[in-house]
Amino acid sequence: MSTYVSQGSYGPVTGVADQTGLNPGNWTVTFDPSVLPQVPYFEVSHIVVNGAPGSSFLVYIGTRLWDSVLNGFSNAWDPAVPIPLIPGEYLYFCWSDPVTDLDPPTVTIWLRYDQDVRANMANAYNQTQS
């Protein structure tokens, strides 16, 4: 049985003109690994997004497409399968609407990790893994 430990929320992060090359001319929200936890294996367990009416977005882990969401406006996402992440990975939300609309989207994510995963135990108990 898993024992999840909340890492709290991150955000809201506001979109900027895409700098990834994944979404030229459109809004992209970036979660940089430098601000995410350094737990070996963690996951995004909940997401709240708000973008321009009628917009949609794609979710990428690095350059790998994870999901496509049709409603990018005032939406909450509690996926049945959370987004798995490891330290060093970027998480991108690439909106369908252009930066010229001057209506940047925002994203807030909630993270958790499973303290029963052996690699996570050192973090869970603040001790060094042997």
Image (cartoon, rainbow, N blue to C red):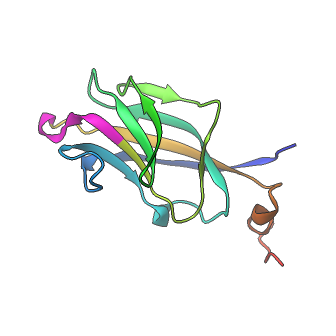
Depth check, front residue: 80 or 21:
21
* Residue most extreme to the right: 1
Q: Is residue 68 left or right of residue 119?
A: left
Determine if residue 60 is in view. yes
The majority secondary structure of the magenta stretch comes to strand
Q: Residue at x 15, y 37 (%)?
A: 102
Task: Give the number of marks.
Answer: 0
Residue 97 painted magenta = yes
- The quarter of the displayed image where residue 31 is located: bottom left
Q: Residue at x 62, y 48 (%)?
A: 43
In the rendered image, residue 106, in percent from the top left (x then y), is placed at 35, 40
* Residue most extreme to the left: 100
Depth check, front residue: 90 or 3:
90
In the rendered image, residue 10, in percent from the top left (x then y), is placed at 50, 50
| Above or below, 43 relative to 53 | below
Q: Residue at x 52, y 29 (%)?
A: 77
Q: Residue at x 75, y 62 (%)?
A: 120
Depth check, front residue: 128 or 81:
81
Q: Quadrant of the C terminus?
A: bottom right
Specify start and end residues of the magenta stretch as a single range: 94-101
- The quarter of the displayed image where residue 94 is located: top left
Q: Is residue 53 left or right of residue 69?
A: left
In the rendered image, residue 84, in percent from the top left (x then y), is placed at 61, 48
Q: Quadrant of the N terminus?
A: top right
In the rendered image, residue 105, in percent from the top left (x then y), is placed at 31, 37
Determine if residue 124 is in view. no
* Residue most extreme to the front: 64
Residue 31 painted magenta = no
| Above or below, 95 relative to 61 | above
